[in-house]
Amino acid sequence: MEIVKKCEWCHKTFIGQMVTARFCSSKCCDQAYRYKRNQLTQLVYELSKAITPCEQSSVSNHHVLTNIEGAMRITGKAKPTIYANARKGIIPHYKRGNKLYFYEDELYQWIEGGRQNCYGINSEEMLKEIRQGIHHLPSSNR
C-alpha cells in the first residue's frame, strides 16, 4: 500500500515509507528543524528581553520602608515576636522614637540568608555579653 503525503517543508507530494512521515527527504527535514530552532531561539531571546525589565523593577520596588504590620506580613511572625527579635538584634530594623521601621528587601534577604547577627557580633562577643548578664547569688545565700 502506497502512502501519498505532502512534505511539510517544500509542499511536494511524495510516497511515504511510514504513516508518520512528514518530509520528502532528509534535506527538507534538516531545513525545517533549523528553521524551527531559529524561531524558538528568537522567541526565547525576545522573552528574556521582556522579562528582564520587569525583574529589575520588582527588585528595586522592594526597597520600600514599612512598619511592624508590613514586617508581620512578610515574615509571617506575630507582633511580639518581631519586637523581641528587633530588641535582640536578630531582625534588621531601624528605630525612630517609639516606632520600628523595616525595609522590605532587607527582610527578604534576612529570610533567605538565615541572617542571625545584624550588628556584626561574633559568637565570642555574644557569649561574653550573655555571661555578663548572668547574676549569681552570693555564696552565703545559696
Image (cartoon, rainbow, N blue to C red):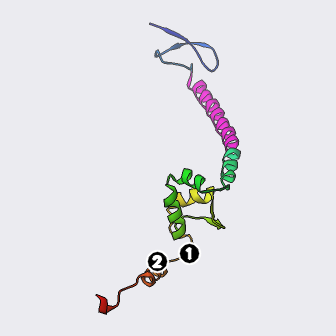
Residue 135 drawn at (x, y percent): 40, 84
Q: Return the x and y of residue 38 as percentages of the image width and height.
A: 65, 34
Please name the amino acid that badge 2 sits on. Ser
Quarter of the rendering occupied by the C terminus: bottom left
Distance of mark 1 from mark 2, alpha carbons? Answer: 10 Å
Task: Classify 29 as above or below 54.
Answer: above
Mark 1: few/some/many CA within 10 Å (<14, 14-19, 20+): few
- Report the magenta residues as a range: 25-51
Would you identify the image quadrant in which residue 43 lies?
Answer: top right
User: Would you say 130 lies left or right of 11 here?
Assistant: left
Residue bearing mark 1: 120
Q: Position of residue 140 (x, y in %)?
A: 30, 93
Give the structural element (helix, strand or loop) at label 2.
helix
Q: Residue furthest top?
A: 1
* Numbered circle sitting on residue 123: 2
| Label disc, if present, on residue 86 of the rendered structure | none
